[in-house]
Amino acid sequence: MAMATTCSHLSSSPFFHSQISKTPFLHHALSTRRQPNSPSLLRRLSISSSSASSAVEPVTTSQKQTKTLPFRIGHGFDLHRLEPGYPLIIGGIDIPHDRGCEAHSDGDVLLHCVVDAILGALGLPDIGQIFPDSDPKWKGAASSVFIKEAVRLMDEAGYEIGNLDATLILQRPKISPHKETIRSNLSKLLGADPSVVNLKAKTHEKVDSLGENRSIAAHTVILLMKK
Ligand SMILES: [Zn+2]
């Protein structure tokens, strides 16, 4: 789903707010303020990396978890519409194609779902809530900014990447000529050894929007290990 839709849809969702109160880690992290569900607290999850002068505090995760697990698993999913006139950016690499992703940021479906996998493993809100599309500073932002923040949160929580397995789903263009470049760049962005970052790609058998070259999707599963 496009970040714009993800954010606006979920940030106002009762489900999201009920999940906050059910999540000991996040509830604890947020309980330092008076109202766990208030927009100001959600805003605190926004980062200030693009603006040193920003007054927004980065979220702090260290020593906040009520339960320390040796491993944490996260899953991420993302989908974007493909439209003519936009670049197709996958894993930070510009892939030649006759269309690309229309999105608030650069529409990098792979990096978005990797960010969501990391955030999910940490028990944090999703990418749409941490980088809201209502904030103009994320318009056209390179998604590497989101990856760097997710890695910072992971480090702060005391975890490192065990391994990551991602699957891209798109009908065209063929990803095989670009796969190693994408995988290598993703490893670099994550600060992870390339041997623990796996990337697969498949078509959608010409059915539905994915198979008709009208959208692109990605899944990621990640294992985090306590440092
Ligand atoms: Zn996205």
Image (cartoon, helix red, strand yellow):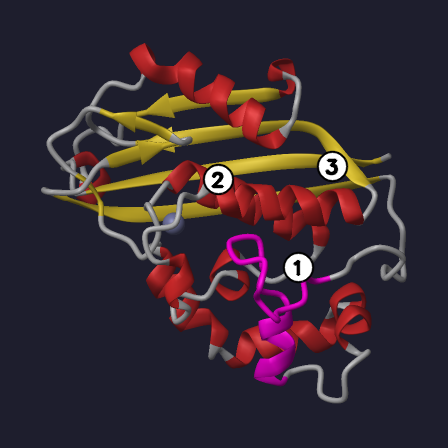
Please state the horizontal and vertical placement of residue 100, each as a whole percent of the image.
20, 39
**Which disc number belongs to residue 224?**
3
Q: Position of residue 226 (x, y in %)?
A: 85, 38
Residue type at mark 2? Ser
Q: Residue at x 67, y 73 (%)?
A: 20
Foreground label between 3 and 2: 2
First of labels 3, 2 by sequence position: 2
Tag 1 secondary structure = loop
Q: Residue at x 33, y 45 (%)?
A: 106
Magenta-tinted stretch: 38-59
Which residue is denoted by mark 2 in the rendering?
144
State the residue at coordinates (89%, 50%).
68
Disc number placed over residue 124 in the picture, else none: 1
Where 29 sits versus 161, above or below? below
Question: Viewed as shown, does residue 22 lie left or right of 98?
Answer: right
Find numbered disc 3 in the image and state the secondary structure of the residue it sits on: strand
Dot 2 alpha-carbon crowd within 10 angstroms: few under 14, some 14 to 19, many 20 or more: some
Residue at the front extreme, as displayed: 53
Instruction: State left or right for residue 28 relative to residue 169.
Output: right
Vertical position of residue 194 compared to residue 159: above or below? above
Disc 2 is placed on an element classified as helix
Of mark 3 and mark 1, the one earlier in the sequence is 1
